[in-house]
């Protein structure tokens, strides 16, 4: 199926999402330092962000999260660490008092969330990420709101990725299981044909089996060439599929490295991965 952005690379084992540059550095996971970014800059970066909600106190302190082309980047950390806040900051839902957000080299710090969607950002927030009273199909149509062209191909691609959604397309999204709702939310974000996808806890509240299935689908999306920046509370499992990982604590970068580095780091294991 040529011209199908969600399927072109399916089954292409040569184009692994595993980062060819990964596999660990001599330094291992980096502690208490600035997250390291590639020369030329990553595809999407919230760089040294400091800021909070409205006129409230700063929640983020010099916080950096980023994802590069072909990668899955994962943000983990305790409850209240500022993971969702960092995602919202990158998406433009927060005052970034210091620092910058750049997409493909362009400074987008001043853009509204709507303008960021138009630039190619897809965002699935942690809560309220679907319209429960609308059908599955209507949710996907809402996702395509910025498009003026025919998006039926994209919808077919989303249905190919998540076959259960095709089956349930005329059902109210609120009647679906937790895992299926998350598929609706991710599908909705894919309807704009994003250049980068941000997911805040896509596996929240689902069983381990459903979590594995969702991770498989997320890997599949990444393989089609859409880099993924996601927050996960299933830290160990998420770092296993991560090219790059960030541990946030109290709004700041505590550790960063490849997923492999973080999984191997004794301190990260002890403090964040249950030993
Ligand atoms: N809308 C909001 N307004 C004010 N403070 C908020 C808001 N959302 C979150 N916070 C605060 O920001 C801090 C980080 O929260 P959050 O980013 O949701 O953490 P995490 O996603 O890591 O669990 C918490 O202290 C929380 O109370
Ligand atoms: Mg959160």
Image (cartoon, grey):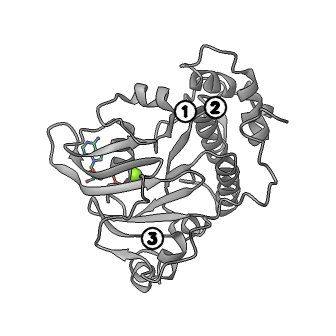
Residue highlighted by disc 3:
257
How many labels, in total?
A: 3
Residue at the spot 64% in from the left edge and 27% down from the top edge: 140
Residue highlighted by disc 1:
130
Quadrant in which the N terminus is drawn: top right
**Residue 10 horizontal/vertical position (percent):** 79, 49
Residue at the spot 57% in from the left edge and 35% down from the top edge: 194
Q: CA distance from mark 2 to mark 3?
A: 37 Å
Label 1 SS: loop
Q: Residues within 10 Å of mark 3 (few under 14, many from 20)?
A: many
Q: Nearer the viewer, residue 157 or 162?
A: 157
Residue highlighted by disc 2:
173
Q: Residues within 10 Å of mark 1 (few under 14, many from 20)?
A: many
Mark 2 vs mark 3, foreground winner is: 3
Q: State left or right for residue 164 relative to residue 111.
A: right
Mark 2 vs mark 1, foreground winner is: 1
């Amino acid at each position: 199926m040529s011209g199908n952005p969600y399927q072109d690379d399916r089954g292409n084992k040569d184009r692994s999402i595993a980062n060819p540059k990964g596999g660990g550095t001599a330094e291992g996971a980096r502690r208490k330092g600035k997250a390291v970014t590639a020369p030329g800059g990553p595809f999407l970066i919230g760089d040294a962000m400091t800021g909070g909600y409205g006129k409230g106190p700063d929640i983020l302190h010099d916080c950096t999260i980023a994802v590069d082309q072909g990668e899955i980047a994962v943000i983990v950390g305790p409850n209240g660490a500022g993971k969702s806040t960092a995602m919202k900051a990158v998406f433009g839902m927060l005052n970034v008092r210091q620092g910058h957000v750049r997409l493909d080299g362009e400074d987008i710090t001043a853009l509204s969330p709507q303008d960021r969607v138009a630039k190619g950002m897809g965002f699935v927030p942690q809560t309220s990420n679907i319209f429960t009273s609308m059908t599955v199909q209507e949710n996907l149509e809402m996702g395509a709101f910025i498009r003026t062209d025919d998006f039926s191909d994209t919808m077919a691609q989303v249905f190919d990725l998540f076959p259960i959604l095709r089956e349930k397309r005329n059902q109210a999204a609120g009647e679906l299981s937790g895992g299926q709702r998350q598929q609706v939310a991710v599908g909705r974000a894919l309807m704009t044909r994003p250049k980068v996808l941000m997911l805040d806890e896509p596996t929240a509240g689902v069983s381990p089996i459903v979590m594995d299935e969702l991770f498989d689908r997320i890997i599949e999306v990444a393989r089609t060439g859409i880099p993924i920046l996601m927050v996960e509370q299933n830290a160990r499992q998420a770092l296993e599929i991560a090219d790059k990982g960030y541990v946030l604590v109290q709004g700041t970068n505590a550790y960063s490295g490849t997923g492999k580095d973080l999984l191997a780091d004794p301190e990260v294991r002890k403090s964040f991965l249950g030993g």
